[in-house]
Structure formats: structure tokens, C-alpha cells
Image: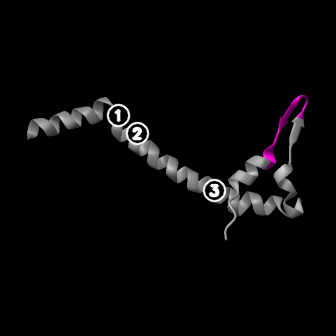
């Protein structure tokens, strides 16, 4: 039985499973932090300047490059019902 436990510990160390689990937990925490930042700080700041949801079609054009930032903000903002 002790040999199985030793092999399991060696497996965890060799494949860095603990580091992967910690990275996953940090990723989940960062996701909720960024969602809160967008929902509570960024969107309330942008909405008064672009009323009626027109921000969803907002773009930034630099020469031939066009970034559709409104689509990104629309996906980042989840409306609460």
C-alpha cells in the first residue's frame, strides 16, 4: 500500500499536477475578477456616453486595421435578468 502512495506522489511531482491545479484555481478567480471589473466599473462608465446600446457596434480604425471593440464589450457584459 505504501508503494502505491509513493508512486502517486512521484506522479504528482513528475507531471506537476499540483501546479496545474493551482493555475486552474487562479484562472477561475481572475475570471470573476475581470467580469466584476467590466460589469461594475467599465460598462457604467461607457454607457452614459453612448446611450441606447450603440456601444455594441463601436470600432477603432487604425489605417487598414479595424477592431470591433463593441462586439468584445457586448460579449464581456452579461445582462442580469
User: Which residue: 88% across, 59% down?
Assistant: 50
User: Which residue: 10% across, 35% down?
Assistant: 3
Query: Is there a contact, CB below 8 Å, between mark 2 and mark 1?
Result: yes
Bin the neighbour count of mark 1 within 10 Å (Cα to Cα): few under 14, some 14-19, many 20 and up.
few
15 part of magenta stretch = no
Q: Which residue is mark 1?
A: 16
Q: Position of residue 71 (x, y in %)?
A: 77, 48
Residue that extends furthest to the right in the rendered view of this protein:
63
Q: Earlier in the sequence, mark 2 or mark 3?
A: 2
Q: Is residue 34 above or below residue 22?
A: below
Q: Which residue is mark 2?
A: 20
State the mark number for residue 53. none
Bin the neighbour count of mark 2 within 10 Å (Cα to Cα): few under 14, some 14-19, many 20 and up.
few
Q: Is residue 71 above or below residue 6?
A: below
Question: Image quadrant of residue 69?
Answer: top right
Q: Which residues are magenta?
A: 62-70
Q: Secondary structure at mark 1?
A: loop
Q: Which residue is mark 3?
A: 35
Amino acid at each position: 500500500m505504501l508503494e502505491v502512495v509513493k508512486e502517486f506522489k512521484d506522479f504528482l511531482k513528475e507531471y506537476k499536477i499540483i501546479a496545474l491545479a493551482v493555475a486552474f484555481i487562479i484562472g477561475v478567480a481572475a475570471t470573476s475578477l475581470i467580469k466584476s471589473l467590466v460589469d461594475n466599473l467599465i460598462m457604467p462608465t461607457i454607457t452614459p456616453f453612448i446611450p441606447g446600446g450603440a456601444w455594441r457596434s463601436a470600432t477603432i480604425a487604425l489605417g487598414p486595421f479595424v477592431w470591433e471593440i463593441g462586439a468584445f464589450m457586448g460579449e464581456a457584459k452579461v445582462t442580469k435578468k
